[in-house]
Image (cartoon, rainbow, N blue to C red):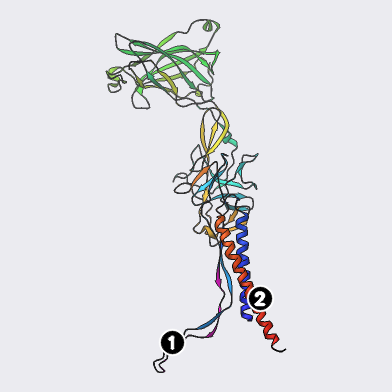
Amino acid sequence: MMRSMFSGVSGLRVHQTKMDVIANNISNVNTTGFKSSRVTFSEIFSQTVQGASGANPNTARGGRNPMQIGLGSNVASIDQSMTNGAAQRTDNPYDLMIQGEGFFIVSDGSGTYFTRAGAFRLDESGNLVTSSGLILNGWKAIDGTIPGTREVPKTNTRGIQISGDDEYVMPNSTSYVRLTGNLNAVTDKEKETSISFFDSLGNEYTIKARLRYDDTNKQWSVALADRATVNGDPNSVVMLNIGAGTGIASDLAGGNSVAAQLTTRAATAADSASPVTFTDAPGAVIKFTADGLPDIASGAASGSITSLQLVVDDSAGVISPPANFAPSIIVSTGELTQFSGIATASAVTVDGNVSGVLNGISIGSDGKVTGYYSNGQSKVLWQVALAQFKNPTGLERIGDNLYRATSNSGDFDGVGVEAGAGSDIMAGVLEMSNVDLAQEFTEMITTQRGFQANSRVITTSDDMLQELVNLKR
């Protein structure tokens, strides 16, 4: 009877522990990134009343099994379920969810921790932090490229901070412009467009260009205006003298190009009053095949070019310093066509830009943090790093949705892994708790019944002891 009472007490204890775990699961049913737990039981040990014996041919007796009395139950384990929770859309660009395995790496001055709760925000210093102020970790981009090659290996993660040179982009000079669209040699034998390019300080220069068809030679000539406006201001003008450059050279696409030297000088009042005049760029001729495509195959032999190289000279000291410009600005003509229809030829500035300030960021499925700037540019600033463990259920909860590595979870190497290969990052989404209320309520019922049954064991054993005491009366 005493054994049964102690067995009942142990049963009450383990069922109370299980009820505690169930209650914690249910209380965190709406906790972001929470992982539910379960309890498993095991028997403590058994008292052997009689050992086992084998069959004995001498006595003609068969074998006997051992006789043992169990002495109660014990908690065998409290295991965490690391299955993914459902996704909750928030449209907040700083809310992140890991679709698959892995943990966000967060840190403060006291250490490094791990979490599945991706509710982050930017603080006043540009740190991407949790609600409690721990900083999300990742890798800093170098010139828009995330380390990860043999030449630039990944280093230990550090706190993501959008500050310093992340908050702006430098201006860049233009080196490549594309002329695209259609030219019509029948109805639109003259087409004007504007060519814009930037210096390294971000100043934008706009030159008018005129394409004119020559009926006699069946080719188009390229003429440039004698002035360029600066930063779109019609009152800020630089005068240009168009002359021959270094002649036929090779452009970026491997075709033929002609260089035109642009010599600058300051504009005068007379210049402003005079009309714009055009000067043919020496040797700049565009020819088309019978199919209406650029005559690139004939190359220099046909006299046709695939690009015009503009070389800016500042011998007059109007633009200071001359090094503000790229050594040459290639104006590609290889994408023009000569079909019937409307003449749509226009220039597209491929590179070069003014300076810009950060307008916002986005985080991709690969964890790359991209900044978007006021000048229309974008660049990769950081990449969010993830931590993966051989045994994630071995992590230790330390509260506030945080985990800490243990000897049974596996160590964190300080570097982490990239998102991808089954561990994508979803922005604007939070991971909900993986608690299954139907399962928890069912477990609660069976736990309650188990607790009641063990309490009956104790009361019944008590009644038996009472009867034993009453034998004296």
Q: Position of residue 170 (x, y in %)?
A: 54, 30
Label 1 sits on residue: 63
Determine whether the residue tagged by mark 1 lies in a helix, strand or loop.
loop
**How many labels sit on residues?**
2
By secondary structure, the bulk of the magenta-drawn segment is best described as: loop
**Horizontal arrangement in the rendering, residue 119 relative to residue 300 (left or right):** right
Q: Residue at x 52, y 83 (%)?
A: 67
* Other-residue count near label 2 (Cα within 10 Å), few / some / many at <14 / 14–19 / ≥20: some
Q: Residue at x 64, y 39 (%)?
A: 125
Q: Position of residue 383 (x, y in %)?
A: 52, 43
Q: Amino acid at mark 1?
A: Gly
Q: Which residues are the magenta region?
A: 41-61
Q: Which mark is residue 459?
A: 2
Quarter-wise, where is residue 452 in the image?
bottom right
Determine whether the residue tagged by mark 2 lies in a helix, strand or loop.
helix
Quarter-wise, where is residue 254 in the image?
top left
Q: Is residue 192 or residue 393 the one in the foreground?
A: 393
